[in-house]
Amino acid sequence: MAELCGQTLCPMKEPKINNILLLNKPEKITSFRAGNRVRGFLSRVTGSKVKVGHTGTLDPMATGCLPVLLNGATRFSQYLPGEKAYRATIKLGITTDTLDRTGNILQTRPVNCSPADVEDALKAFRGEIEQLPPMFSAVSVDGVRLYELARQGKTVERKSRKVTICALELLDARGDEYTIDVTCSAGTYIRTLAADLGEMLGCGACLTALCRTSANGFSLADCITQEELEDIEPDKIFEVRPFFVPIGDALKEYPALEVSQPQASRFSNGGELDRKRCNPIPDGLCRVFSYDRKFLGIARVEGDNIRPNTVISRQ
């Protein structure tokens, strides 16, 4: 653990961090709590309050890749790739109110299917499909989170929505438990996928394990646990890669534009730039950097103008 000054970590003289911390979330805690723990630790390390956000909730039962956005990086989550990947274990023959092993058992049914039957059933879930959000989810209906209603024993009508299963492979079969790899669009519920698969097979199913193996262009192999983070010397934290990624680097799918100091000041204050006065850049979104490679934000290039779309901070 990093050396303490009394009960508080020695504050560092570190400029405000606008990065993504790639966290390996453990089981039994919420994404919110995981983010709060990161915020508390980094606030003590830097000596200033750190704002955090994340790009998609993981259930307490789930583990794996949780990109935690820090400070100004929280403004750019919509520009990150939305695709995520999971490794999931599904138990056939059991249904629960939460669609996973943490819930109350609703039914147990006989299982009369083989791995070949499961493989065949998976075909129906590849590509664009309709999913009904589970009652135990963070989706809001009339301003109320579904999980809040579910905890009161209430069930309300929900609208199904389209999601895309980009890849779905059966990895292992052990008795009535099946392990699958899923690559999917943002907003996909793997619990719902498990339950729907069980209904198609006629025996019901629930999720028993879930690990997010990649998210928003980042891999679980690049992530760090909270304990590993807290074991790093405070003055070395911001030097360690790949788990600590500047937001400007994370948005690498967009072309980069470097601007002069006066242009940087104008852009950071919401002003348009004259495209003719900048280096050649294609139409569409681009990253804007200052002459000293400081990330300033995302701009839209159109016609003769470069317009700020999202600015990281005003200068």
Image (cartoon, grey):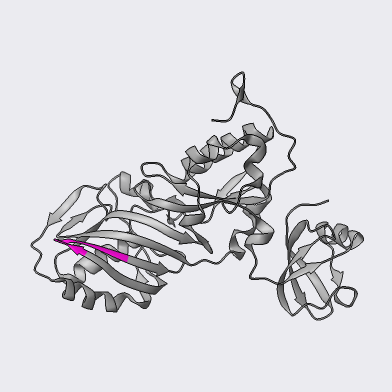
Q: Is residue 50 visible?
A: no
Residue at screen point 77% across, 64% down: 288
Q: Compare residues 232 and 144 and report the one nearer the observer.
A: 232
Residue 6, horizontal then vertical, whole percent: 61, 18
Q: Is residue 116 visible?
A: yes
Residue 167 sits inside the magenta stretch:
no
In this rendering, the answer to whether 262 lies above or below 307 is above
Residue at screen point 29% across, 53% down: 209
In this rendering, the answer to whether 165 lies above or below 22 is below
Q: Compare residues 199 and 255 and report the one nearer the observer.
A: 255
Residue 202, horizontal then vertical, whole percent: 14, 69
Residue 229, horizontal then vertical, whole percent: 54, 40
Answer with left or right where residue 299 lies relative to residue 9: right
Total count of labels: 0
Residue 235, horizontal then vertical, whole percent: 67, 37
Q: Compare residues 191 and 131 and report the one nearer the observer.
A: 191
Answer with left or right where residue 122 lies relative to residue 33: left
Answer with left or right where residue 304 lies relative to residue 172: right
The quarter of the picture where residue 274 lies is bottom right
Main SS class of the magenta portion in the image: strand
Q: Which residues are magenta?
A: 173-180
